[in-house]
Amino acid sequence: MSSIRDEVSAWVEANWDESMTLREWWRRLAAAGYSQPSWPIGLGGRGVDSGMAREINDALGSHPVVAAPTGMGPHMGGPTLIEHGTEQQIQYLGAVADGTQAWCQLFSEPGAGSDLAGLETTAVRDGDDFVVRGQKVWNSSADIADRGMLLARTDPTASKHAGLSFLLIDMRQPGIEARPLRTMNGNSQFCEVFIDDARVRSSDIVGGLGTGWRVASTMLVHERKMAASGSSRSLAFAAAGPLGGQLDRPVGEIVAESRRRAKNRPAAMINSAKSLVALAQEHGANTDPVLRNDLADYFVRSEVYRLTNLRARAGASSGRTPGPEVSIGKLALSGLARTSRDLGTRIAGAGGMIVGPDSVSQGRVQHAALSAAGVSIGGGTDEIQHNVIGERALGLPRDVTS
Ligand SMILES: Cc1cc2nc3c(=O)[nH]c(=O)nc-3n(C[C@H](O)[C@H](O)[C@H](O)COP(=O)(O)OP(=O)(O)OC[C@H]3O[C@@H](n4cnc5c(N)ncnc54)[C@H](O)[C@@H]3O)c2cc1C
């Protein structure tokens, strides 16, 4: 009997062609149900459980191909709509699965991050539409998004949690302006978004009017899961949607570019224990007993984090609702990011103060150091994860501000 790995390999063999466009590759992945395997058949999935979905993703990741669409639409929008959306809203996921649309999350505001329910953006009924006005901030990839997952106040007279609704908003309409923000690591990953009389059809309210907090809470669990789960094995990723600028490029070109970048690119948010050991060897610092001890400690914590993630995945595969391990995983990742920052800059010494590809470690250690703070903020800060663990796992009294 052939395994799913064999089945995926045979499919890749028959379908991968370096000269085809990304649009066509993603269309094929979705049509075969390999794009988002746990989603319904006909919407890029096969309706399989999350364990089997991971096996399929791992099998695809073992081939030198472009990964299926990833990010907020697939990892956060999909599971949230499948749980709370109407039949019509769930159909929107087809364009997420085949990558022809990119989605973003419009939750945080200048005065409402951790205290999300205090947000002030309003959506006011006007006939069969809602008219939206307000400002959002820190919204990842909002400048290239086609659809926004928006939390707004639809009833200013209700209590702060009860007055919210979750809306799907067309990002490409007049009245929405997304301005990229540059962060200290040099990336322009997120935006501030100004919304001035933009419109949403009432049929695009998810979960019903006034139930936004419940829908948003589902999405936040999936966001933490995504933030805690670290990187996938895939070689090449590409931005979805027409504004991502990748859809009409040949997939072979995207893979070749990713290979080149994998050699030269600055590290992501975190240096692996292995890369820090290599750096210590390169700098002759690997004989320092204190540093050796700290590297070993970092390796052990990285392993504990990896195993906690595996436990969370195994739980999800057996149908268990995600519990405190999601917050524990996210907290562990924040701690690792800080240690990786400190160890990297310690090993790099004075040279670590200079950034850019022509500096120590081709700028990897410096990039990770400047990215570490973001890891403990995005997806809910460390303090908020402590609150979640305290309240939901340990049964401690609720945070006074909630
Ligand atoms: C990389 C990255 C990507 C992001 N992407 C998105 C996105 O796509 N969409 C989106 O909507 N948002 C996004 N965000 C925003 C993120 O969700 C918020 O930054 C986060 O929720 C914190 O909110 P804040 O920045 O307003 O900080 P605040 O809430 O003002 O917090 C300031 C400090 O006070 C602490 N604090 C606040 N309340 C409490 C409390 N009750 N108990 C103890 N301590 C508390 C916090 O832990 C923090 O240290 C992103 C952020 C980052 C860093």
Image (cartoon, rainbow, N blue to C red):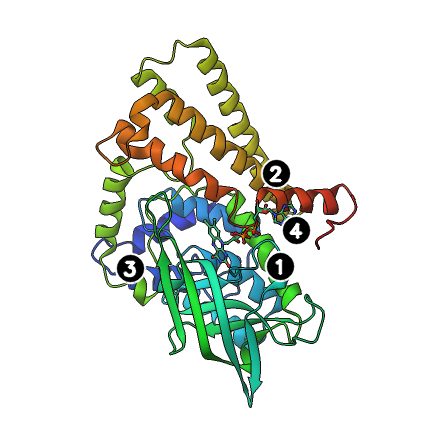
Residue named by callout 1: 218
Mark 1 is on which residue type? Thr
Is 94 left, or right, of 388 in this rendering? left
Q: Measuring from the top left, give residue 303's x and y in whole percent.
A: 53, 28
In the rendered image, residue 98, in percent from the top left (x then y), is placed at 39, 64
The reply to whether callout 2 and callout 1 are in contact (CB within 8 Å) is no
Q: Is residue 43 above or below residue 318?
A: below
Mark 4 crowd level (few <14, some 14–19, many ≥20, 10 Å Cα): few
Q: Earlier in the sequence, mark 3 or mark 2?
A: 3
Question: Which one is nearer the viewer's eye here, 359 or 331?
Answer: 359
Which disc number belongs to residue 319? Answer: 4
Instruction: From the top left corner, tell me how far across and down residue 400 is, in percent.
Output: 74, 51
The answer to which of marks 2 and 1 sits earlier in the sequence is 1
**Farthest residue in the bottom direction?**
127
Question: Which one is earlier in the sequence, the residue at label 3 or at label 4?
Answer: 3
- Confirm if mark 1 falls within 8 A of ligand 1: no
Quote the CA–CA distance across marks 1 and 3. Answer: 31 Å
> Residue 168: horizontal and vertical position, in percent?
51, 72
Q: Which mark is residue 22?
A: 3
Earlier-in-chain disc, 4 versus 1: 1
**How many angstroms separate mark 3 from mark 4 (CA)?**
33 Å
| Side of 250 where 237 appears, left or right | right
